[in-house]
Amino acid sequence: MDLQYIDFFSSPFSFTVGQSSRQTKKGTIQGAILSAFVFIFAIGYFSYLFHQFVNNQIEPNYKSQSFITEERIDIDLSSDLLGFRFEYKTNKDLQILQASQNQTYLVFYAYFYYVNGTSLTQTQLNIIQCTNPQLAGFYCLDFSPVQNYTLTLSTKENLQSQIYIYTYGCLDIDFNKNSTPNNCANQTEINKIVNGLEAGFRFKLFTSQFNTQTKQIQVNYRNYYAYSLGKYITYTSLKAQKQITTVKQGLFVQDQSNYSSPISYEKENQLWDREYTINNINQSGYGMFELIMNEIVEQVEIQYPTIPSILALVNSTISLLMILGYIGRRFSEGKIKNDLFLMLLQNVYQEKYLQILKCNQLLEQNIDSRQELAQQQQQKQSQQQQNQVNLIQSKFKNDQSGVFQEQLDESQSQNKQITLRNIEFRNKQFLDQQNKQQVYKQENKQQHKTQQLSLSLDQKISKNIDFSVQSPNHQMKTAFFKQQIIEDQSNYKLIKSLAEEKQTKNIIKKEFSKKLKISNTNIMLNQNGKQHSNNFQQLKKSLNYEFSEKLQSILFKFRFFCKKEYLLSKGLDYQQKKIIEKQISKDLNIFEFYKDILFLKKAVMILLSSEQLAVMKIIGCSSNFLEQPKTLINKDNQLNNTGQLNYFQEQYKQFESENLQFEKIEQFIKRCQQNSSLTEIDQRLLSSICI
């Protein structure tokens, strides 16, 4: 198994776009504005969240669950677990009244009970003044005798601990209180205090919980009231509910802290008949307070956010804002299509490209002084060539007969029509071939006539000889026939000389036609070369980023209405635009692209022999080409003639340099103007130039 397949950080292959070698995505101004907006918003939102995170203003994740358990539940015993007092009026402590009057109305007894199965342990607790500032003016319990115990409950193990506080009248006696103080008030005064309208028992019970804002344990006391009646014993039972809090906090790696404390108390009040309890269960007093554990436990889990969670919030917000990215992507796709559109115009439809530039006044319509001077020189050369042609024509006219003069005039008229109409190269070849065939036919006819005359002359001679032998006047007729033969021979020589003269004139005519065509071709090449040179200079000037951006802003300007009319006013027909866009869509199709590659492969295989095709594997650049690539080109954008470059290296270097390409184009146009050694491929290239 290849371990590269499990590489999580592998990157896909992608082409680059634009002028940068590292730019794999096409950007636009509109997309940059949207990206800047998203970036600024994301940074601002992250700063806002981070500020809240530092100041603990982000709400943590809070989970709470309450359940009943049979396991052991414990609460530590401390002196500030609870505070109590009897108020004869609102916020009026009875102990202050007793101290001021030096009389005792009510007394308190506290006990701790521990039940383990069937055994019961009772421990009396001392009542002391509370030292906690939050319990100022209240009485607390001293749990030092039971410091090894806790307020506990386990229904599974049958364990339970209880705290009882009894409130007696100063004169009451029962199984817990078996003595009376010396300064007791009478029963009437005691009943008056107990039966007061606002008289009652007030309790403060300890609670604590984790404050999510301050990240600290916050201690509070829960207040409970139980009103007193002289005829009843007020029984108040409070069940403490324990809360277990788990706190997780940290920037990246979170620490866990656990806290436990009573959080709430379940209250239950009962009124017992005082006389009945005294007589039947020997229970006296005015109030009984019971504190036990509740079997319901509340579990709370608090988890504070981390830096990754804040980044996740920012990321989700960015993902929401990326809906705007759809608009930016549309702009980017349009920009890519526009670039491809202009690239097709610049490389395939150059003539239309120049027309659009001129229509939008992106190129100067007037030629500069250097171009005007070159144009004048070319016009002078063309005029001189035309004068030479006229001189040859005048000389040729003086040496020719009327018949040849008419043929010459016809040839001149045809050549002038060729010059004026700029007939293409193939039509010229066709006309040349036709002229050759006509001359060849005329020569054949003349030779045929000459042969017929010679044959007829021989026949006459043979007949005359036969006749002379058979005739009786042989000697008289022999002289006559000899004279006739001499005349026929002279006529034959005359006819033969005329035929040879005619053939010579045909050859002269053919050579003149060739010279005339060459002259006309030179004139046409000079005229076209001048136009090609001007258009080439303009095309070279326009093939840069500035012109492309300007033309894109003009052609692809966003408009709601009159799009066709607008394009037409800018030099581009709407139908032409559709044709180019259709061609771009076809070229971007991967199947069409692959089909073109297959076509090129087949073409190379057909054009090259098997040996040449095999040699293609080892064609390349030498090591010197890599060691000093910059020294191969001089300041004039010409290849240095170092003798170290092979043919492929020269072609490759020229293909990579636009300046060298333009230089070679200028050389080709000049060579075509001079009509020096133009091959068939050169003529094809020249006829295909569309600028």
Image (spheres, rainbow, N blue to C red):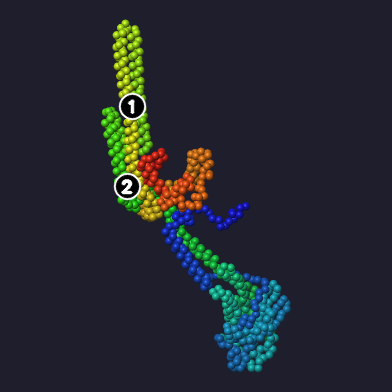
Q: Circle 2 — which element?
A: helix
Residue 77 percent location from the top left of the image? 65, 80
Q: Who is closer to the viewer here, 216 or 567?
A: 567
Lateral position of residue 588 relative to residue 206, left or right? left
Tell me which residue sits at (31%, 16%) in the image: 486
Residue type at tag 2: Ala
Residue 108 visible within the image: yes
Q: Who is closer to the viewer here, 80 or 601?
A: 601
Q: Which of the numbered marks, if any, corresponds to residue 284?
A: none
Residue 592 percent location from the top left of the image? 47, 45
**Residue farthest to the top?**
472
Residue 585 percent location from the top left of the image? 44, 48
Tell me which residue sits at (68%, 77%) in the image: 160
**Residue farthest to the front?**
642
Tell me which residue sits at (43%, 57%) in the image: 28
Q: Who is closer to the viewer here, 585 or 341?
A: 341
Residue type at tag 1: Gln
Q: Contact (CB < 8 A) between labels 2 and 1?
A: no
Which one is earlier in the sequence, the residue at label 2 or at label 1? Answer: 2
Lateral position of residue 586 relative to residue 144, left or right? left
Residue tagged 2: 374
Determine which quarter of the picture holds residue 119: bottom right
Lateral position of residue 344 relative to residue 59, left or right? left
Residue 287 visible within the image: no
Q: Who is closer to the viewer here, 672 or 160?
A: 672
**Cα–Cα span, label 2 and label 1:** 44 Å
Q: Circle 1 — which element?
A: helix
Residue tagged 1: 503
